[in-house]
Image: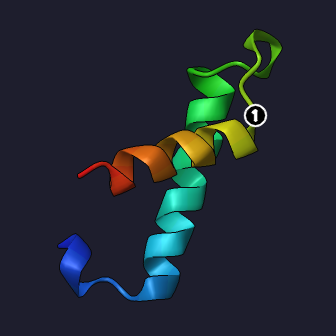
Amino acid sequence: MKFSSMSQEALERLYSTAVDVLLEFVLHPERGWRRQKVEHLVERIINFA
């Protein structure tokens, strides 16, 4: 499935699940990572132009 053909709801679920997996297995909260920090970083990357 292409991202461009996904509904907004499906994209939001995918994004949320991906952040959850990153926080659980890669960006451990005990190292200072929180959902808000990850979302801020993603926003900065997306808006970098």
Q: Is residue 42 above or below residue 10?
A: above
Is there any visible trace of residue 35 in the rendered image?
Answer: yes
Where in the figure is residue 3, as x and y percent of width and height? 24, 72
Residue found at the very far right of the displayed protein: 30
Q: Residue at x 64, y 44 (%)?
A: 20
Residue found at the very far top of the displayed protein: 31
Q: Amino acid at mark 1?
A: Arg
> In the image, 36: left or right of 42?
right
Q: Residue at x 68, y 37 (%)?
A: 37
Q: Residue at x 57, y 54 (%)?
A: 17
Q: Mark 1 falls on what kind of element?
A: loop
Where in the figure is residue 39, as x and y percent of width and height? 60, 48
Q: Residue 47 versus residue 35: which sits nearer the camera?
A: 47
Crowd rating for badge 1 (residues with CA inside 10 Å; few <14, some 14–19, many 20+): some
In the rendered view of the protein, which quadrant contains the N terminus?
Answer: bottom left
| Quarter-of-image position of residue 26 | top right
> In the image, 31: left or right of 20?
right
Q: Residue 32 versus residue 10: which sits nearer the camera?
A: 32
Is there any visible trace of residue 1 in the rendered image?
Answer: no
Q: Residue 24 versus residue 41: which sits nearer the camera?
A: 41
| Quarter-of-image position of residue 45 | top left
- How many marks can you see? 1
Q: Which residue is mark 1?
A: 34
Q: Residue at x 73, y 45 (%)?
A: 36
